[in-house]
Image: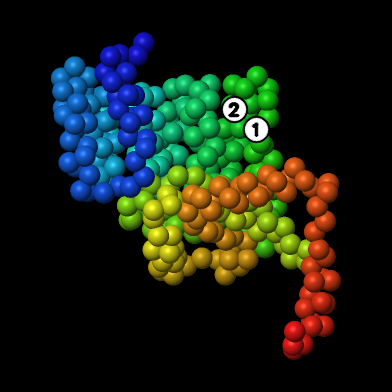
């Protein structure tokens, strides 16, 4: 049964969902929520510490975030205390840890579709598409036999990597480094998706797209990621199999709209032959017009 404190927590959590920036100066803005958390401490210390952990995450105080959430879990390990730790970790772009605590929460409520969806969303961000093998059967069971749109993706990605002479563990360090770079910034990602990009003569590759709010300068965060990636050692062929982009929300939505238009019009749109376009370019090269 949901307690009054949990209802209050959910109301606050809903209000906090609009924030897109983690900033230590937000303490003033979040003061009223901290006051609510403090008032909960005696009647529901698990809820109170969970809320304080989320608020610390939003202030970009990662050390305090871990401290409060672990205190809540130590008091009562439950689906509630575990899944909201996973939420704070995801907002901090600590995707591997987030997936770990989401899986622990799932053990308490194996048929919870919201938790299953959260893990499915996190799986690519950990570089571990093999997580699909564990959670998709549970998702299908909880969805009355319906297949998830990603039900074949583990096999597709495994085959894609194999064509480049890679395995899943080669992908994980690079994706983790992207998360680590973003965790050191004040960003909260709005959306994420991955696409399988096919090529006529070369093996396909997987492309990760990260969306950030329109009022953020994408190049700043791209530079942070590039600096982090430059400091790690990856398989030399990984760049042939994986790419990424950081996009402002409007651009991200525009590409999605264009993709849907192409899918809906697939039978009527004729795409130029790349080889013919290349030949035309060679023929007109150097011609003044």
Secondary structure type for disc 1 = loop
Mark 1, other Cα within 10 Å: few <14 / some 14–19 / many ≥20: some
Residue located at (61% from left, 37% from top): 133
Secondary structure beneath dot 2 equals helix
* Residue 286 percent coordinates (x, y): 74, 89
Examine the rendering and report whether any part of residue 175 can be seen. no
Residue drawn 33% across the image and 47% down it: 21
Horizontal relation, residue 140 to residue 228: left or right: right
Q: Residues within 10 Å of mark 2 (few under 14, many from 20)?
A: many
Marks 1 & 2, CB-CB < 8 Å contact: yes
Residue at (53% x, 59% y) in the render: 245
Q: Using the numbered discs, state the Cα–Cα distance from disc 1 to disc 2 in whole angstroms.
A: 7 Å
Is residue 286 found left or right of 236 in the rendered image?
right
Left or right position of 35 against 234: left
Check residue 20 in the rendering and tell me which mark sits there, or answer none: none
In the image, 61: left or right of 113?
Answer: left
In this orientation, which residue lies closer to the viewer: 97 or 188?
188
What residue is pinned by disc 2? 139
Residue at 39%, 55% in the rendered image: 216
The percent coordinates of residue 76 (x first, y second) are 29, 23
Q: Where is residue 63 in the image (x, y as percent from the top left)?
A: 24, 46
Q: Which of marks 1 and 2 is nearer the N terminus?
A: 2
Spot occupied by residue 96 in the image (x, y as percentages of width and height): 44, 45
Q: Residue furthest top?
A: 1
Quick check: 224 above or below 154? Answer: below
How many numbered tags mark residues here? 2
The C terminus is located in which quarter? bottom right
- Give the camera-side residue of 105 and 269: 269
Q: Label 1, on which residue?
A: 148
Query: Is residue 268 at least partly visible in the picture?
Result: yes
């Amino acid at each position: 049964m949901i307690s009054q404190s949990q209802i209050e927590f959910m109301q606050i959590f809903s209000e906090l969902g609009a924030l897109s920036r983690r900033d230590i100066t937000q303490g003033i803005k979040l003061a009223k929520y901290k006051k609510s958390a403090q008032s909960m401490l005696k009647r529901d210390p698990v809820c109170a510490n969970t809320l304080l952990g989320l608020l610390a995450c939003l202030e970009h105080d990662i050390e305090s975030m871990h401290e409060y959430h672990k205190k809540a879990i130590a008091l009562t390990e439950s689906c509630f205390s575990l899944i909201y730790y996973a939420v704070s970790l995801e907002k901090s772009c600590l995707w591997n840890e987030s997936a770990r605590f989401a899986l622990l929460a799932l053990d308490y409520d194996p048929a919870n579709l919201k938790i299953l969806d959260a893990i499915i969303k996190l799986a690519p961000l950990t570089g571990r598409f093999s997580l699909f093998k564990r959670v998709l059967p549970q998702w299908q069971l909880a969805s009355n036999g319906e297949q998830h749109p990603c039900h074949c993706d583990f096999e597709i990605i495994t085959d894609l990597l194999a064509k480049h002479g890679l395995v899943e563990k080669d992908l994980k360090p690079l994706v983790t480094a992207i998360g680590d770079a973003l965790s050191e910034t004040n960003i909260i990602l709005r959306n994420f998706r991955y696409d399988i990009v096919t090529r006529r003569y070369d093996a396909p590759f997987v492309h990760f797209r990260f969306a950030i709010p329109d009022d953020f300068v994408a190049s700043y965060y791209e530079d942070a990621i590039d600096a982090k990636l430059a400091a790690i050692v990856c398989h030399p062929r990984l760049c042939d199999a994986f790419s990424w982009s950081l996009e402002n929300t409007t651009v991200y939505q525009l590409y999605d709209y264009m993709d849907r238009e192409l899918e809906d019009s697939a039978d009527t749109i004729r795409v130029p032959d790349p080889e013919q376009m290349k030949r035309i370019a060679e023929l007109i090269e150097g011609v003044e017009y």
